[in-house]
Image: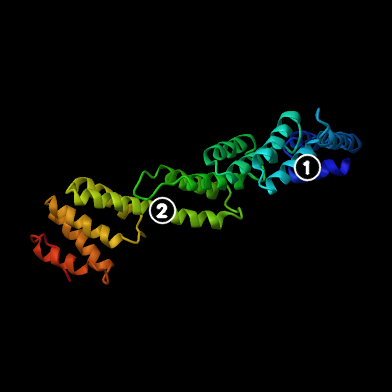
Amino acid sequence: FYRTAVQCYTRGDEQLQPVINLVMRQSNMLPKYRNYLLLLCGIWVCLSGCAKSKSGLTADEYLRLGDTQSSRNRQQKAREYYQELLTNFPESHHRAVAQFNIAETLFREKEYIEARFEYEKFLELHPAHGLAGQAQYQIGLCYVKQMRHYDRDQAHTRAALKAFRTLRRQHPQHPLIPDAEDHIRRLRRRLAAHEMSVARFYYNKRAYHAAIGRLLNLVQVYPQAPDLDEALFLLGASYRAEENFVKAQQVFRTLVDRFPTSSYISRSRAQLRQLPDTGIVLQ
């Protein structure tokens, strides 16, 4: 039992940790009394795992049954076992895993709204648990699964981006960080495509002021966007339509300098020749 208590101490058991920390901080306590308290903690852990519910099952057995049902793609039945564990064993050290697994079963059933709620509940109850990073990653995936086409509302895309950035900030060494970074890059490209789609719509409707706002945001926030040369051309053309010739020339000049092989080069040069002289000389 003493060994069990020490193992719980070293692995950071959530239920036992505060008690053991209190014991270990009492530096003036005689070693034999400290050992006795650790012994009692070990007994408590063992009993919490071995106690039985009215059905005669232990917390360990409920967890194993839930895992078995989930592996057989019987997610609802698995949730029932996990929920029984949570209901019947309020002191079990398996509660955190059961809570996380409930979210996992919902995710596998593509119930992404409910799954996200359960992942968030897990993080609220167990923010320092070893599965916290994975739960945060799964929240991002739930939003990814709900994303709409890039020319529609992108609220879920922005929420997914925020979730993956939270993972990167709170768990910088987590093994899922490389995958999160890939998602962040894809999500940013998607948001850039959305901005470009809206900007084209405004430009084609000759709503140049609105187009300028979208294009400026695209150029400033997503400087690596694949359509950046087109964005600059439309921005310059919008400034010209608004008779802001100074900014139009600056934008066209930027396009010529930064994208010498762009398909918009010839049209940009033509625009520069047609604009009134503003003191900007084209090389």
The answer to whether residue 124 is seen in the rendering is: yes
Q: From the viewer's perspective, is residue 226 above or below residue 135?
A: below
Of the image marks 1 and 2, the number of the one nearer the N terminus: 1
Residue 52 screen position, x and y as percent: 83, 32
Position of residue 38 measured from the top left corner of the image (x, y, whole percent): 85, 37
**Can residue 244 be seen here?**
no
Q: Residue at x 59, y 37 (%)?
A: 118
Q: CA distance from mark 1 to mark 2?
A: 42 Å
Q: Quadrant of the N terminus?
A: top right
Q: What's under tag 2, amino acid-wise? A: Arg
Q: Secondary structure at mark 2?
A: helix
Q: Dot 1 corresponds to which residue?
A: 9
Q: Is residue 196 left or right of residue 249?
A: right
Q: Residue at x 56, y 46 (%)?
A: 138
Residue at the farthest top position:
54
Image: 5 above or below 276: above
What residue appears at the point 72 percent right and 41 percent down from the top-left corner? 66
- Where's residue 96, x and y in %? 69, 38
Circle 1 residues within 10 Å: few <14, some 14–19, many ≥20? many
The answer to whether the residues at label 1 and label 2 have Cβ atoms under 8 Å apart is no
Q: Quadrant of residue 232?
A: bottom left
Residue to which mark 2 is pinned: 188
Where the C terminus falls, by quadrant? bottom left
Q: Position of residue 154 (x, y in %)?
A: 39, 45
Q: Residue at x 30, y 55 (%)?
A: 219
The amino acid type of the residue labelled 1 equals Tyr
Residue 36 disc label = none
